[in-house]
Image (cartoon, rainbow, N blue to C red):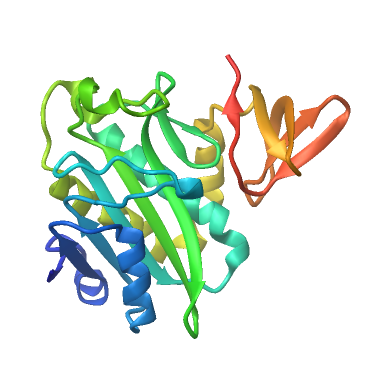
Amino acid sequence: MRKFFLNNLKDKQGISLPCFFYSSLSSTMTQAKQLALSGVTCGCVIANKQTGGRGRFDRTFLSKRGKGIYLTFFSTWQDCSTLPILSGLVSLAVQELLSELDIVSSIKWPNDLLIDGKKICGVLCESIDCGQRIVLLGVGVNVNYVSKDLAVLPNRATSIRILLGKRYNTLLLAERLTQKIASLVNNFDLVKDKFRQDYIASCITLGKTVSFTENEVNLVGTAVSLTSELALVIKVGNQEHILNYGEINLQT
């Protein structure tokens, strides 16, 4: 393991935000938890490969060497009620990175980034208590995957390479993304109101027919709005259901 500080961060961030790089890890999320439990209160774990990468609901996340951004940003966080907002804010940070590459993406609630209905990024948000509350924000972005790589996935997916036709340095992209996440997290109170507007504008789930599970019952309804905490409001018949977290499927 090699510890370094991101060269291009502002002086204060470069000193206060250690970045831990690994050639290979089971999971950046797991390693970030171990660092937090050992007393490191903020930082970013980046891996060139994951052998046990996971997404929501412990699903396997494809993590081949040099083919994606695999990172977990972690920091102290007091207000757990704002975690959905923070998770969505990270989605916007990835969206901004993609935009700089001239890639237009949209957000599927709560934090998947899609391009023409195909997933290019997922965000995983968790928190742990190790004397103080630590939030962990895991990010996986498909960068250099080709169609053959992604054929093993059960859902449709795409990558930067498929879209733009060339390979990218995943670690340089990870550095740029970490800068964006660090800036947004450090200025959360200043950007959260504008963030909500940007998130709503980018969320393709609103107005769509969606299926979801509530209390082990499968339901279908229309996603009508988002609460101030970014919970999804779904109308089923004459009744509204509020999802604070979970998973929905867009109906075609």
Q: Is residue 175 above or below residue 155?
A: below
Image-based side of 118 in relation to 163, left or right: right
In the rendered view of the protein, which quadrant contains the C terminus?
top right
- Relative depth, front residue between 127 and 193: 127
Image-based side of 116 in relation to 100, left or right: right
Q: Is residue 187 above or below residue 35?
A: above
- Relative depth, front residue between 103 and 116: 116
Residue 192 locus on image (x, y percent): 52, 54
**Residue furthest to the right:** 238
Q: Which corner quadrant of the image does residue 221 belong to?
A: top right
Q: Residue at x 72, y 25 (%)?
A: 220
Q: Is residue 99 above or below residue 32?
A: above
Q: Residue at x 35, y 26 (%)?
A: 157
Residue 35 locus on image (x, y percent): 31, 75
Residue 58 locus on image (x, y percent): 46, 49
Query: Looking at the image, can residue 2 be seen?
Result: yes
Query: Looking at the image, can residue 97 be seen?
Result: no
Q: Which corner quadrant of the image does residue 206 belong to?
A: top right
Q: Which corner quadrant of the image does residue 251 belong to?
A: top right
Number of marks in the rendered image: 0
Image-based side of 157 in relation to 247, left or right: left
In the rendered view of the protein, which quadrant contains the N terminus?
bottom left
Image-based side of 49 in relation to 122, left or right: left
Residue 175 locus on image (x, y percent): 19, 54
Q: Residue at x 30, y 59 (%)?
A: 28
- Relative depth, front residue between 201 and 212: 212
Q: Residue at x 49, y 61 (%)?
A: 126
